[in-house]
Structures are given as structure tokens and as C-alpha cells.
Image (spheres, coloured by chain):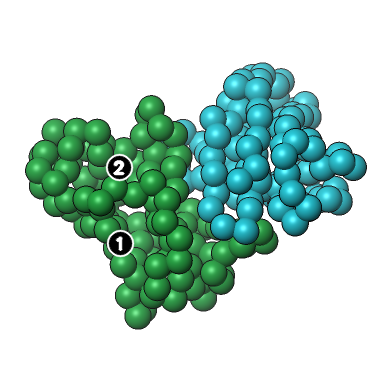
Amino acid sequence: DAKTTQPPSMDCAEGRAANLPCNHSTISGNEYVYWYRQIHSQGPQYIIHGLKNNETNEMASLIITEDRKSSTLILPHATLRDTAVYYCIVLSNTGKLIFGQGTTLQVKP
Amino acid sequence: DSGVTQTPKHLITATGQRVTLRCSPRSGDLSVYWYQQSLDQGLQFLIQYYNGEERAKGNILERFSAQQFPDLHSELNLSSLELGDSALYFCASSVTSGGTLETQYFGPGTRLLVL
């Protein structure tokens, strides 16, 4: 299973874009990049996923580099409710989500 | 609300006891996954069931077992409980058997405290 590397913590001002990076240099050609977040001790919440093209939904945008070795999750206008731990996961054929330590995003007023 | 339900929300028990955690997947989902989140280990995959059959196994202890019933709900049984089993237990569900394009949706979790 491909491993991911994320910064342990980041701060963002409320209303500004939050850009969360993730490195996944050992990703294979058919493995998707998934992003989840966990607010306090709630269940992880699905945000977005992608293979090689940039993706956007109502929650966020996902930018994947051309070589697929890294990606960035963008929350366009962060709010205080976006304060959470964000997990970048490469989903392999096993279907198991392998959670790392994630990035703790603190949105500040 | 993900559509995945878990009961109970909280559980307090003593060492050596046995408990059962219950999960109901989203309507139409055939796979159920169980995860454990402890302070020192983070979120770890335990086991997956697909349409009643065990599909994948992770770091699940022999004292733990699970099953998925014909109505697709799942139960995680934890026995001979130890202090270290105190954790959040999450259930997730997905449409089919899993793979590289299979979004899992998580329930709110059961918080287990072993005293």
C-alpha cells in the first residue's frame, strides 16, 4: 500500500483558502488519492478523490501533479467549522483505507 | 449524516468482559468495514465483510470477531477485554466489495471504555 506524507499541522485564516499538501511518491498507476477529514472524534468524513485529473466538488478541490507523486487539497474559503484532521490516503486494490497521522488544520478567526 | 448508524454511542465495561458493537450500513451498501482508533495507534483497519462473507482482514486481535447478517448489518464482538481495548470503534460501508474506486462512508462511532 502506497504511503503518504503530510505536514502534521497547518493554520489558515478564516475566509482564506486552505491548501493542504500530500506526498505519495510510491503511488501506482491505478491507485486513487482519497481525502477524508475527522472533526473532533466524529467519524471520518469523505471529502474528495481523484486519479490523475483535477477534481472539484461542493466541499473542495483536489489538484494532482502530472507525475501523480503529490496532491493538494484546497478548501477555497475556510471556515471555523473546517478545523479538523485531514487525511490523505492512497486506496489500493485491497480496498483498505490506511490512515496516517494526517494534517491538523486550525482555522483561525 | 453519512447514513451509517452505530450503536451504542458509548460503552463502559470492565476488564475480562465481552461486548458487542452494532453497525447498520447505508441503504444499498453491501460492504461493511470496522476500524479502531486509539490514542497511540491512530485509525486502524480491522476487518471487512462483503455481502455476509469476510473479505479482508487487518490488525484484528483473535479476541475480536465480526459477522455480517443477511440484512447486511454487522456486529463486532470484543471479548476478554483489556484496558488497551479502550478506543473509538468506527464502522464504514461501501457499495460493493471494495477496490481502488470505492468510497467508504463512516458512522459516528462507538466509544468503548474498559475499566
Q: Is residue A88 left or right of residue B115?
A: right
* Disc 1 residue type (three-letter): Ala
- Which numbered circle lies on residue B66? 1
The chain holding disc 1 is B
Q: What residue is shown with label 2?
A: B111
Picture coordinates of residue A60 (x, y %)? 74, 44
Residue in front for this viewpoint, B29 or B64: B64
Which residue is farthest right? A66
Say which amino acid is labelled 2.
Answer: Arg
**Residue at 42% in and 56% down:** B57
Chain B colour is: green
Q: Tell me: A32 left or right of A85.
A: right
Q: Quadrant of residue B39?
A: top left
Same chain under badges 2 and 1? The reply is yes
- Is B112 placed above or below B53 here? above
At 29% from the left and 47% from the top, the residue drawn is B61
Q: Secondary structure at mark 2?
A: strand
Q: Image quadrant for the C terminus of chain B?
A: top left
Q: How many marks?
A: 2
* Label 2 to label 1: alpha-carbon separation: 17 Å
Where in the figure is residue B25, as x and y percent of width and height?
44, 66
The image quadrant that residue B4 belongs to is bottom left
Disc 2: host chain: B
Report the disc number at residue B24. Answer: none
Q: In the drawing, does residue A64 fall left or right of residue B112?
A: right
Q: Which chain is cyan?
A: A
